[in-house]
Structures are given as structure tokens and as C-alpha cells.
Amino acid sequence: MEDYPEELRTPPVTLVSIVGFPELHSTISTYLHSEQPPINTLALPDFSKISVMARNPKDKTLDSSSAQPGGILKKDWLLKHRTRSPAVIAALILLNGYRVVARGRNAKTVVVVVQSTENDEVSEDRIIALRKRAEVDSKYLLNFVSDASQLKESLNRLGSTFAELANTYYREEGKRIKARIEKKNTNSLELIIRYCFKVAVYAEFRRDWVEALKFYEEAYHTLREMIGVSIRLPPIQRLIEIKTVAEQLCFKVSTLLLHGGKVIEAMTWFRKHIVCYKKLVGAPDVVFLHWEWVSRQFLVFAELLETSSVTVPNTSSQLSVMLEKGLTEWEFNPAHYYQLAAHYLREKRLCLEVVLSVSEASPSSAADGIESGSVSVIPSVFIGQFSQLFEQEDAFRTQPLTDAEYILYAIAEGKRFQDSFEIIALFKKSFEMYNNLKAQRMASYCGHLMAIEYFTIGDFSNAKQLFDGVANLYRKEGWVALLWEVLGYLRECSRRLSSVKDFVEYSLQMAALPISSSSGSQPSDYKRKYGPSGPASLSQRQSIHNEVFELLRGEYTLSSNEGSSDLKVEADRPVHLEIDPISPLRVVLLASVAFHEQVVKPGASSSLTLSLLSQLPQPVEINHLEIQFNQPESNFIITSPQRSLLDVRSGDQQDLRVETAPFLTLHTNKWLRLTYDMKSDQSGKLECLSVIAKLGPYFTIICRAESPASMDALPLWKFEDHVETLPTKDPGLAFSGQKIIQIEEQDPQIDLVLGVTGPALVGESFLVPVTVTSKGHNVCFGELKINLVDARGGGLVSPRESEPFSNDSHHVQLLNVLGPDGEYESQSGPDNIRSIQHSFGLVSVPLLNFGESWSCKLEIKWQKPKPVMLYVSLGYLPSSNEAKEQKVHVHKSLQIEGKTALAISHHFMFPFRRDPLLLRIVKPIPGSDPTTSLAFKETSILVVNARNCTEVPLRLMSISVEVDGDDTGRSCRVQQGGGSLPSQPLLVPGEEFKQVFSIIPEVYLQSVGVGTVCLRWRRESGLEEQTSSSIIAAGAVTRHKLPDVNVEMVPLVVSLECPPYTILGEPFTCYVKIQNKTKLLQEIKYSLADSQSFVLSGSHNDTIFVMPKSEHILGFKLVPLASGSQQLPRVTVTSVRYSAGFQPSLAAATVFIFPSKPHFEMEDKVTENKASLLMNEQIS
Amino acid sequence: MIVCIAVVGHQNNPLYLQSFTEADDALKLHHIVHCSLDVIDERVNNPKKTGPTLNETFLGLLYPTENYKVYGYLTNTKVKFILVTTDLDVRDADVRNFFRRFHSAYVDAVSNPFHVPGKKITSRTFAERVSTIVKSFGLSTAV
């Protein structure tokens, strides 16, 4: 597009001329230029220069319609109208001095009278005189005031007048030319085209795009009719001219359509243009000119598209139009046109090469003349025409060319340009655009063509780089035929770049491509169509294979680019190839290694199968194979018996194991399977890393070993319908075989014993004895790891639970590791590692020789009943030689239950036969919590039960009620009843122990803390008692928090007094004492029921009044009539004030009656004991 | 005249590619088929752009080359068929009809128990059937 003249590329701009007053010119022209639409100014300093605009008299003769026109469009016509032929001429005068000069032109004239200030009076007469002389309408006689205050206004006036006049001028001019067309007074097509063009340009000047488009199209269609009709010029040049004009018209039309937003129309137009003109190839000698022209069409259209930022239509109506016209979305992309431009330029280059080779073969004298420069060819006055320029006697004379001369000129011109760089630039543009669109295949096609162009001009490194990228895509998608071509180029590039390794790699890749068809015939121009390697065929693969192996054996020398440095594989220039699982060379050699077992004992042997596969078309013989492992001492070499070992072993490989195989030849698509025994003493992982194949004296392939289980299918070949076999004979191994084998560690010869007896009890320090006994190995650098894990899952920690008696939140804790003698391990020496955390411990084990043993005890404390897994593992070295040996590990685990030792319960009760009236019990307040109520300053009884829930006997050491720490002062007095413990009672499993406490609340409060029952106990371990340490002797403590109680004021206390036993027939007295603790008079009703067992005296029913703070005693005399345990007559006491009745409980109203006076031969103390025992029984 | 017909697999690998030209421009047809895969990708990934061809196996005209027209077809198993023809005035209905017949031939070929899915189609019967269909493509337009 840049090749086009400026006036063609940009829309035309109105031109006006101002004459005179040069000092105002810059102001006016700047203003006019910034107008919308802008106006260009042709400024002339004074009237003497006005002849610039004057019409050249010679034009007249040329333009006459009668004569046959010399061409279609004149080259400088448009330029003239844009730069030299103004629409309006404005004369800036003071008053006088304007002469009519532009009479011959139709340009409008304006006379501008310049005044320095507004006040400069111009007389009416003078104005009229001026108008007459200048022959201008009064409308176009303007005043221009250069005063700053009026300048803006004057400029505005000037601008609008100029625009109006210019519009009129261009319309009139257009009409004038249009009239000529309509009159049809000429049958010269050239003139019609010219007129149409002019009308269109004038329309463009007026910004009448519709008319402009119409006439450009008209011109284009008329031009189309000229093809083959016109005989004005020699045929070649005639076609050139037509095409050149068509190009300009097409450019104008496309531009107008695209800028008008008619994208689809533009596309269709352009497509028609190409279809129509592409066929007009022209004379065979100048075909290249045609292709160059076609290429330029595409390039210009691409540039137009790119600059007008076209979007692909996306509305459905546009889409349907698009489909109708057979357009696809890629046609809206400039990349498509750049690619085609490059393609045709390439076509041009090829044609030109042919023409040049012919012309070089037969040089003609005329060509010499043209080239020598004595005769020069210049563009003629008409677009698309050329003429000869002669220099004759200081004057230049032009003369038309003959076609033969023109051809010579065109060839000479063609030689001057290097099209390849242009082609590459176009392809590159297209390549980048497609890449941005993520159209990688189109991009790689462009890359491919670009690379071929680089290849043609001999820039092999650029070509190689591009080809490599393209080859990757084709390889990935399995386009073998395309890949073959690219690899052929790559192979040639690396040969030219003298890179033997690359040459070998590409050759091997080509030889191993899945191509089986054999198209024997090779067309003569195969290089152009197939690249340097010819068409893909099996025979071609075979010949490439043979060539590369000859090269690798050193039998063949590759000639490089210049021929100066030949490529040869020699001893000092060996070739090493590396093949990894993603390398494209995998098809050349694939090494699969499978161990037959997954795990093996150290020193035991396992089979290893090595399978090799190659897709090369010819058999390949391997000299020897070296198998490498991660443990270098396991490496070994496989050789065939024909080969001597001398060339195998070299240098540091002296001590390697050597195996032999019957033959080491790889056939196409046939696994070479080799099985050997492997043995390793080193525990851990044994992994086969790589297989090194030596294929000739100077050629090695290092092939990464692959496991059959995780082996990918061969690239390219996986799409082929060919026989696939398994790498190993055993199909199971082929699917699961691994190149890694796990070598176990040595069997430990150590006993690790965890001696645990029964479950652990919550609260105690539970000891787990651990014994390490050597049974064959010495234990050096032994380490004992201890780990506690919750057996049910979940952690041993529960941070949310806040237990009052667990300091930390660990439910089970490893407290310590005790030495064998039960003492804390002394921390001596740096080797003595010791680290104990809540659930983890690490202890070092001292050196143990054969037969020795060592033990320790783990002290673990349970805070909650929870089962726990205890893991103990011992790691050690069997000998003190740290470097050589590997650690041996012994693991032991054990589940230990944690159990609650003692279940503690309690209950409160009132003293025997003494009952305070507790109003809350009588009348529970609804909504209050059912807490126990105790009478204020009255003795209550607390009974604590402790039951042994374990399966071992426990010894109780002490029991007490401890006041909670946070209580200020004593809220109640607690006394241990029933004397002290009888020398640490022993509780057998399931046995229950009871302890009685008396409580006297001393504070009158709603809720009073009673305290915590603290039970100290220990396991009764019998014989082991001596060995157990002080920790165990201290015993464990189980706590039981007593609930808070209600303390109440007691209004009345009823107590029944009666002997514990009597003798049949002997009278005794029974008292009911009613204590009034209030300051009120209490009315009490009582009644007494009769009983068969007793004769009684006293009142049966009565109402009494008890004085405040006093006591009333009711006495009954009773004579028992029956022996045994007998119910006393039932007494019912009712308080009227509190509407509360009371009857003593059955137990309280029972006495034992002896038939006769018993004779107890015991001391008083014993009797007392008995009595108390009896009492206890009654309580329970 | 149909110059080339191709079946392209899931990894955009050619499963079957047959050209029907005397001239030795097989490689060029390979390139055309390969490049048209970009258009198929584009159409399948941005279905809103294609509008009327949404949810249809027939993808329509794919690729603008000057001498050829390239049509595409996507089976329900995402195997692509690509047709290259030199006829510049082709009716959509003919192409649809062709693809329908070609599809059934393809289904028969891959239903062969000895055919491994995802591998190239080497069946000779298939090739014969395809060439029959290709020949009748020219005829059906004439009728």
C-alpha cells in the first residue's frame, strides 16, 4: 500500500489558493486545515506567481476528446487537483491590484479586502468598482480584519465561504464531466473510464462517498470490457496498463467499502476482482509480473483490512449473508491475505527464476542496451505505461516501447529485487497473526513456508529453528507425511550446518517413521513438491537408514555446504545420542526394563528382563549393551559371543560383570528380550537408570530405561494399525513390571519385648517394661522410638474439654522412661539421645553385645479411660562400622486399655431418727434444680461409696473430703465419721467400700460447695511391691467432686428417741421431741396409731403449741408384746403453719425386742461397735 | 470433483486420508486438511459464532483456499471428516448427503472387531466404498 502515491491512498482534500498578503497566510492556512472537513491551502505571496495555476497549453491538445487517447488515466491528474488546481482562489488585497488571471479555469474567485482595523472605512464606490473589475458577486467580496479582536470572526467567515464555494466548484466540475459521459459522444472506453474516475474523485472532494463508489465501480466495469478489445498498445503493455488501473480502482472501491463498514461487500468485491484478473496471466515471458501483481493485490487488501480493524460479523443476519456468499471467518483476517500475498510472491520468484535462467542462456543485444543505461525506461504520463527516454542534443525525447523491449526492461527490473526477504516478511506477519489467534496449524503452515524460503536463500539456521517448531506440531498430531517433508528439510539443514549429530538424529527419525507405502516413481520436480528428501516411501526410509549407518561406521563422508569441511564420524569425533521418554528418537530405540519381583531380600537374586525395540526399517546390530543402575556396583555389560571383550572393557569398567547374549540384533518392530539375574546386598531401592547401546565403533545411544507398567505408546506408531507385541513374554509383567526393585533390609536378630500385664488404670503411673535382647546381632547406635497413638483414631488431645484436675489437655501422656533399675536414666555422654514429649519419646540404647539385654520402663499416665496404641521401634546397626552397614529396624506395637480404677458415688442423709423440716422438700419450688438440701447448723450424713471396677485388687490408702481451693473460709464442717480407716483396706475386684462423713453446714446460702472426695490408692501388686518404685508407693489419687448443696433454715426438728432394743414385757419410754427453731408459736397436731405388738400409754391425738425457740417433748410408755424386730406405733406429727406432716420412716420406727435379757459377754467397746455396725446396716 | 477426503481422530491425528487427484499434490492436500483443523477447533470451541450450525454434525464451509473448498463434519464421537473439492459451486445439500453416506461407511469400518479404535483405518473395503461415494458425488450434482 505504501507503494501507492500519497494522493491515491488518502481521501482528497479541498484545495483553495490565497494570493497576496503573505503575512496572513500561515494564520489562514492553519485555520483552514483545522476546519472540519479540512481545507488545504495553496499560498502564493503575490500575483506574479499565479501562473503556477495556469493551464499548461500542451494539456489542451492531449485532452481533446477527438484524438485517440494515449492511455486511460493520467498519472499526475489527481496530484494536480490535490496540490495545484484550487477550487477557490482568494485574492487578499488592500484595495487595488487584483487582476483576473484564472480565467481559463472554472475556479471560483473571492476577493478579500484586508483591513488592519474595523474602523478602516472602505467607501461604497470603491467596493462596487472592485466587484466589477474582479467580476465577483458581492457575496464573495469579503472583509478581512486582521485585528486580533475580529480575526476569529473573519477566519470563520472565510472558512465557510471557501467551503461553500469549493463544494460548488467540485459539483460543477463533476457535472460537467458527467455530462460528457451521458452524451456518449465518445466511444473510446479509455475516456469513459477517465471521466468516471474524475467524477468519482470530484465526488470524493465533496465527500459524497456513494457517488464516488458508484463511479469508481463504473470505471472498473468499463475497464473490464477493455480487456482483449483495446488495440492501442502492444498486447503485453496493454494488459499491464489495464491491470495497473484496475488495481487503483479496486483499491479505491475496497477502501470506500471498508471505511463505510460494508465488510462483506468489500470481501465479495475483492474476491471477484481476484477471480476475474487472476486468469489474465499474460505472456509467458512476463508471468512473474502477473504474480507480482496478484501478490500486491492481496498485500494491499491485507493492509487495508488491518488498518480498518474489521471484525468478523457476528449477528445472525450478517452470518447468513456470509454463508450465502460462501465466506468463512478466516477471510476476515488479514493473516489470510498476507499468506496469499506471500504465496503469490513466491510464485513470482519461481517464475522469474525460470525466465532468468532462460535469458542467461541466450543473452541478447537489446538486453545489453537496456541494462547498460544508454537508453532509460521511465514511467510515462499515463498510469501503468512506460516509455523510453532518449537523450538527443541536450533534449529529452520519449518514445513508446515495443513489447520485446518491455520484457527486457521488466526482467532487468525483476533481477534487482530480492523477493525472498519480502516473502519471509509476509509469511512472518501471517505466522504471528495466526499465532495470536491460537490457530497453531495455520501458523505452523506459514512457519513451514517461511522456513522453506529461508532454506532457499541459504539461511539454514533460521530455517532449522522454524522447521523444528513445525515438526513438533506434526509429530504431536501424527501427520507423518508432513513430518517426513519437514524432517527432510531439517536433515538437509543440519548437513549444510555441518552438524553431524543433528544429521544423524533427523536421519534416524526419518528412517523410523511409520511409512510403509512404496510409491516408486519420483517425478522430476519432486524437490519442489516434496522437499529435499523426496516422497515418503519405505525404500526411501531404507536408503536413509543405510546412509546414516554407513556414516556412523565411518565408511561414508558427508559433504557439507561449502564442501570444505566434510562431515565424517571418526574416533575423535564420536556420536552420542540420548533418548529419554519424551524424545522423538524413542522410535529408534526403546529400552524397557522390568524386574520380575517387586521386593527381594538382600543377597537374593531376582530376574531382570531387558527389552529393546526399534522401528528402523533394517536390522541393527548392537556391539554391546551396558545397563546402568543407581547402585553402580550392579551395572553390567551384555555382549554377544562373537565380539571380543577387549573392545568392551575400557578404563574404569574393568570390574563390571559381563553377560553374553546369543545375538544382539534388533529387527524392525520386534522386541529383543534379554533376561538376567540381578543380586544386590544393599538394602533400599535398586533402579535401572539407562541402557547404553554401542552400535558401532563411534556411535553410542544412551537410552533412559522405562518401566513396562508406565510406558507410553510409541509416538506416531501408536496410530498405526500394526502388530503390537508386549515387551516381556509374561503379559502380567508387561503390564505391571517396574524398573525399580525394593531390596529389603536385613532380618533383625533382636528381641524387643513389651511386657504389659492387663489394662492401665486412670490416674496411676503405668509402667510398661521394654526389653531389648540381642539374639545374634550386636546393637550399635541403637535408638528406641516410642509413639503413643489413640487406638480409636483421633488425637490424644482435646483442647476443648476443660478438666479441673488435668493440668494439661493430654488424655494419655508419656511421662518418662525409666532405666532398667527403675531409676531415671542418667543423662551422660553426648551419644545419649533422649527426648520425651507427650506422645513421643526417643531414647538411645547402649551398646549390646551378643546375648546381652537391656530394658527400660515407660511411664505412661492416663487421664481418661482411653485405649492407646503403643508403638516401639528399635533402629540399630548390626556392627559399629557406621559407614558400611545399614540400619535394621524392629517394630513392636501394643494396644493398652485405660480403665477407671474406682467408681465413686455418694449420697446425703439425715441423722438417724432426727428429721429437720426442710420446706423445699415439702414444697419444691417449681423450676428450681433438684439439688440436695441440707439443714443449716444441723448435722447431715454423707456416705461415699468406692467400688473397685478393675480386675486387680486395689489397696485404699486414704479417703478424705477436701475443701475446694477457691472456697473462702469454711462453709461447712466435715468430719470423718466412723473413725479412721482400718489400716488401708484392700478392695478385691468388684468390692465396694463405704465411708461416712458428717456435715454441718455453717453458712446459710443457696448453694454451698461441699468439697471433693479424694481417694488415694495403689495397685496391690503382691510380690513386685519391693521392686516398684517410690512413684507407685505414693499411690494414685482419684477425685470425685461432690455437688453443691442447698442450705436451708429449719423451722422445726422432730426427733424420735427410743432405745435401740428392749426386752419382751419390759416397759420403755419413747419420746418424740419437737424443737421449734423459729420465733413463732407453732401449732402442732399429732396422732398415734395403735400397734399389736405394743401396749402403750399416752394421748393418741392432740394439738399442742410449741413456744418459740423451745422444745416440746411427747412421751409414750410402751410395753412390747412380741419379740423380734417390731414396728413402733406410728406417730404422725403435723405442723399447721407449714401444713407439713411427718411420719418417721419404717427403719426409724423399728426396734428389736429380745425375748429375754441378752447376756453379752463382751466389753462395752465391742457392744458399741456392734451397735454402730447395726446402725450402718440400717443406714444402707 | 472431490480431491481429498480425510478422517481425523481425537488427537487431531489423521486416521484416513485419501486424495483422488492425478497430480502429485498430495502433500499440499495434507497441508490443507491439517490447517482446516484450526477452523474446526475454532467452530467447536466458540459455537456462538457459528450460529446456524450449532448442534449440527455438518460444520459447513471451513477454509477459504482459492482453488479448493473445504467442508467439515464432526461425528458424535468427535471424529472429524474433512472434504476438499475443486468444485467452486457446491450445494450444501450435496455435501451433507455425501457426509451422511461417508459417515455410515466409517461406522461400518470401525465396527469391524479387528479394528482398534484410534488407529488408522486400513480396511480395503472401506477404501473401495469411499471411492464409490466420491465418484457418485459428482454424479448426484449432475442429476
Image (spheres, grey):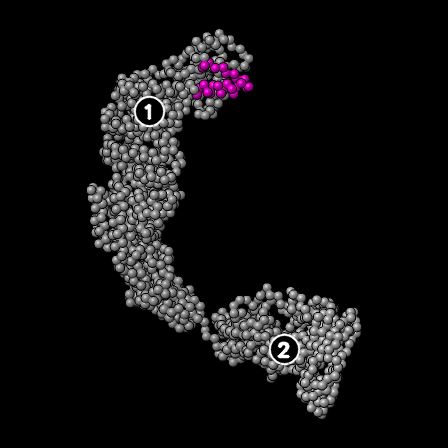
Q: Residue at x 52, y 74 (%)?
A: A895
Q: Is residue A63 above or below residue A616?
A: above
Q: Nearer the viewer, residue A545 or A124?
A: A124
Magenta extent: A139-163
Work out whether A1061 lies above or below A597.
below
What residue is pinned by disc 1?
Answer: A197
Magenta stretch encompasses residue A155: yes
- Give the side of residue A162 with respect to residue B131, left or right: right
Residue at (33%, 25%) from the top-left corner? A215
Which residue type carries mark 2?
A: Ala
- Kindly identify the residue that appears in the image at 69 percent across and 91 percent down: A1155
Name the kind of residue labelled 1 in the image. Answer: Phe
Give the left or right position of residue A513, taking residue A857 as reference. left
By secondary structure, the bulk of the magenta-drawn segment is best described as: helix
- Image check: B88 left or right of A204? left
Residue A123 in picture, x, y percent from top left: 51, 8
Q: Callout 1: few (<14), some (14-19), or many (20+) C-alpha neighbours within 10 Å?
A: many
Q: Which image quarter holds the C terminus of chain A?
A: bottom right
On the image, the x and y values in percent for residue A465 come to 37, 47
Which mark, residue A946? Answer: 2
| Percent of width and height locating residue A346 | 30, 38
Residue at left 49%, top 20%?
A156
Whether the residues at callouts 2 and 1 have beta carbons within 8 Å, the answer is: no
Chain at numbered mark 1: A
Image quadrant containing the N terminus of chain A? top left
- Closest to the observer: A625 or A815? A815
A922 or A89: nearer the viewer: A922
